[in-house]
Amino acid sequence: MAGNSFGKLFKLTTFGESHGQAIGGIIDGCPAGIQLDLEQIQTELNRRKPGQSSIVTQRKEPDTVEFYSGIFEEKTTGTPIGFVIKNANQKSKDYSHIKDTYRPSHADYTYDEKYGVRDYRGGGRSSARETASRVVAGAIAKQFLKDIQFNAFTASVGKIGMDKSIEELDFSLIETNAVRCPDPASAAKMEEYIKKIKKDGDTVGGTVQCVIKNMPKGLGEPVFDKLHAELGKAMLSVNAVKGFEYGSGFEGTKMKGSEHNDLFNEDGSTQTNLSGGIQGGISNGMDIYFNVAFKPVATIMQKQETINKKGENVEMQGKGRHDPCVVPRAVPIVEAMAALVIADYLLQNKSSKI
């Protein structure tokens, strides 16, 4: 299986399956001498881990990260950083009923078609549990980037969106509710809706918005390696993601050029930021902001028609512990992937000027 690594200079390779002994990763290219706050790395993992509230999967995993290399006296050494997160609460029997059955909108069928074998326990390598390794790497990237701030939050759940604009939001409120929405009134509506969806044995999608502040100018390449293209690839590599837009996005298609152009100030900043902080594939120093669309979780607790390995029509129903809405737990994953992209481009920018 190829495609397990992300990044060019700041590079993450992940390994492991949902119901294996552990998941983990190797971070290559992280500069030496970075003072790490290991507790903060664990805090980031805790934001993603299951069982943290009543509106997420109740799988109980401590998700404690163990570092095996690349760190000495809480400083990076410049050598590969190896880490492991042990799986502690697998219930593989919850998946025995789908051993020979393909779940609708899952990777079951495509994995079987491509590899001729699949780990049906929790989806194996296709499980979103793999993203815990990304959060570890992203947490280290954030500490390397220091002053750059990554603020991801739940912007919508189903048809329920925020009542406030980005300019009105207080990002310090993101972690004050289970939904991770900085608009408390909207967060309460979202949480109630997720609870109702869960009670119905169904699932719902939503969007995560991310704002990157204090961005340096000049990150990104102008042709195939545009900064926004790599951010898009990073987000679209996350489980359940169905769409990515940055800056004005699709709304920009409704505007005239005279309305959409970001006029300059004397210092090079712009009066508006419909470009989303990126022009010509290169950061211009303004805030980068983008939206990530997540589909409803494919496993639902309702009976559905499907097929088995023999191509026979069968009926199945989801069992076990699953998220009714993946969006709240996806917030730290979006931040982590954004941090990996920015860290990689920052290193590329430095190497291009040597």
Image (cartoon, rainbow, N blue to C red):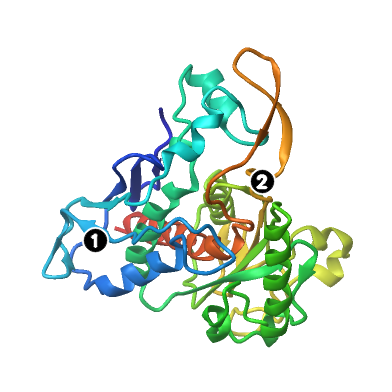
- Which is nearer the eye, 308 or 254? 308
Question: Is residue 185 visible from the viewing direction of this image?
Answer: yes
Residue drawn 20% across the image and 50% down it: 80
Helix, strand or loop at mark 2: loop
Q: Sequence-wise, which precedes: disc 1 or disc 2?
A: 1
State left or right for residue 135 relative to residue 322: left
- Which is nearer the eye, 341 or 312? 312
Residue 191: image x %, image y %?
Answer: 67, 72
For the N terminus, the quadrant is: top left
Residue 198: image x %, image y %?
Answer: 67, 59
Neighbourhood count class around disc 2 (C-alpha, 10 Å): few under 14, some 14–19, many 20 upward: many
Q: In the image, which is nearer the foreground, mark 1 or mark 2?
A: 2
What kind of residue is marked 2? Answer: Ile
The residue singled out by tag 2 in the image is 300
Q: Say above or below: 240 vs 41.
A: above
Residue 314: image x %, image y %?
Answer: 70, 23
Residue 138: which quarter of the image?
A: bottom left
Residue lying furthest top in this view?
Answer: 310
Residue drawn 61% across the image and 47% down it: 240
Neighbourhood count class around disc 1 (C-alpha, 10 Å): few under 14, some 14–19, many 20 upward: some
The residue singled out by tag 1 in the image is 31
Residue drawn 71% across the image and 43% down it: 302
Residue 316: image x %, image y %?
Answer: 66, 32
Residue 135, disc: none
What kind of residue is marked 1? Answer: Pro
- Tally the marks: 2
Helix, strand or loop at mark 1: loop
For the C terminus, the quadrant is: bottom left
Residue 39: which quarter of the image?
A: bottom left
- Give the Cα distance between marks 1 and 2: 44 Å
Question: Is residue 219 visible from the viewing direction of this image?
Answer: no
Residue drawn 77% across the image and 80% down it: 163
